[in-house]
Amino acid sequence: YWDWRPRVSEKEFYMYFCGTAPTHHLFGLREALNMIVHEEGMAHVWARHATLARSIWAAVDAWGLDGPARMNIADPAKRSHAVSSVTLGGTYGTQLRSWVTSEAGLTLGIPLGRPAEDAEGYFRIGHMGHVNAPMILGLLATLEAGMTALGVPHGKGVLDAAATVIAGG
């Protein structure tokens, strides 16, 4: 069964996939590529990712006006348009991740590249792919609800700051 020689020079379609072809995955991939390339266009996809990223950064800046929230990468020119890494300090990151998962069904990314004893105050927000403004605004409102419920100090006006960026301001 684990003889890979027949798969190196496959003669039958099914052998290319080492068994049953994942047809539904292939159709899904084709449709996703159609949406990106032919419907929205790559330039619009990149612009949407950049706008959504900047809206999250504006929200974190607003939270940080009266609390510990801040972006892990201080220089916006060095930040990713795919994912944002945020710190709340102390154990707030872990508490917020747990709260939004249990109370709102929202999953925040765990911190990567940090020692376990230093990871509690951090979380990541993904904002690329099939993500849009209503999703990001809902995410930000949910995070703010979690911070309020947990007593995490934070500035106000977060949705206004994010909406201004999304509106082109």
Image: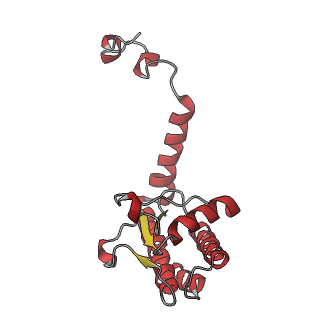
Q: Is residue 104 left or right of residue 166?
A: right
Would you identify the image quadrant in which residue 42 lies? bottom left
| Residue located at (42% from left, 68% from top) | 85
Q: Is residue 151 left or right of residue 162?
A: right
Would you identify the image quadrant in which residue 76 lies? bottom left
- Residue 55: x and y in percent read 49, 77
View extreme (right): residue = 103
Q: Is residue 7 above or below residue 154?
A: above
Q: Nearer the viewer, residue 75 or 27?
A: 75
Question: What kind of colouring is applied to the model shown?
Answer: secondary structure
| Residue located at (58% from left, 58% from top) | 107
Q: Nearer the viewer, residue 162 or 60?
A: 60
| The N terminus sits in image quarter | top left
Q: Is residue 43 visible?
A: no
Label total for image: 0
Q: Is residue 60 visible?
A: yes
| Residue located at (47% from left, 60% from top) | 128
Q: Is residue 33 left or right of residue 7?
A: right
Q: Nearer the viewer, residue 118 or 84?
A: 118
- Residue 31: x and y in percent read 53, 44
Q: Is residue 54 left or right of residue 134?
A: left
- Residue 63: x and y in percent read 52, 83
Would you identify the image quadrant in which residue 28 lies? top right
| Residue located at (52% from left, 20% from top) | 20
